[in-house]
Image (cartoon, rainbow, N blue to C red):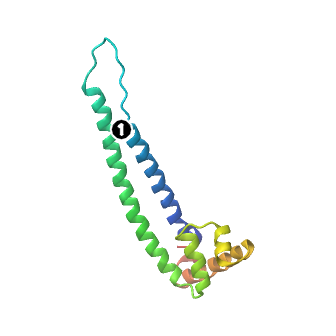
């Protein structure tokens, strides 16, 4: 795994958490939706509760997964902060924090830092080279984590 791939893990995990939150919202909507159909035929009175109970069980399971993912995201962000702190240049640290912790777009980073988009990409490339060297010095093969 390259240093860029390692730093990008938090964004991917954050996306998965958001996806699961959307699923929970959808299941909540489904669980609270109540429709009834009037017919002359008798129905099993427990059937509707069973569907609702299934939805609630899925919601609880999904919320537990989300909590685990959030714990992992916090730990991963803590590790990324440690890596960012190894970079000596404060401007470089800011760029890394904005990209890999705040998940800002390159365009937003350029505006916030007062740089052109091209310059932000050049700086980012330099940072990745620097991080690759640091990882190589620490014994990681070819600068790969």
The residue under the point 41% across, 68% down is 74
For the N terminus, give its image quadrant: bottom right
Which element carries disc 1, helix, strand or loop?
helix
Q: Is residue 132 left or right of residue 117?
A: left
Instruction: Decide which of 35, 69 is in the foreground and name it.
Output: 35
The residue under the point 61% across, 81% down is 92
Residue at numbered disc 1:
31
Instruction: Decide which of 127, 129 is in the foreground and name it.
Output: 127
Instruction: Decide which of 108, 10 is in the foreground and name it.
Output: 108
- The answer to whether residue 25 is above or below residue 14 is above
Residue 99: image location, x then y, percent:
58, 70
Residue 142 in view in this figure: no
Q: Is residue 126 left or right of residue 20?
A: right
- The answer to whether residue 58 is above or below residue 127 is above
Residue 51 in view in this figure: yes
Residue 106: image location, x then y, percent:
66, 68
Quadrant assignment, res 47: top left
Quadrant assignment, res 33: top left
Residue 72: image location, x then y, percent:
40, 65
- The answer to whether residue 40 is above or below residue 54 is above
The residue under the point 45% across, 56% down is 17
The residue positioned farthest toward the bottom in the image shown: 88
The residue under the point 32% across, 37% down is 54
Question: How many C-alpha atoms fall within 10 Å of the one at disc 1: few (<14), some, or many (≥20)?
Answer: some
């Amino acid at each position: 795994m390259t240093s860029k791939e390692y730093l990008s893990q938090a964004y991917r995990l954050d996306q998965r958490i958001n996806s699961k939150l959307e699923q929970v919202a959808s299941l909540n909507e489904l669980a609270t939706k109540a429709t009834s159909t009037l017919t002359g035929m008798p129905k099993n009175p427990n059937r509707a509760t069973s569907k609702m109970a299934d939805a609630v069980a899925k919601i609880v399971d999904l919320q537990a997964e989300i909590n685990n993912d959030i714990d992992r995201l916090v730990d991963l962000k803590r590790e990324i902060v440690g890596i960012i702190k190894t970079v000596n240049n404060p401007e470089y640290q800011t760029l890394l924090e904005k990209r890999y912790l705040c998940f800002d777009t390159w365009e937003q980073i350029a505006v916030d830092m007062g740089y052109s988009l091209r310059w932000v990409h050049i700086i980012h490339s330099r940072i990745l080279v620097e991080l690759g060297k640091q990882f190589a010095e620490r014994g990681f093969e070819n600068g790969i984590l």
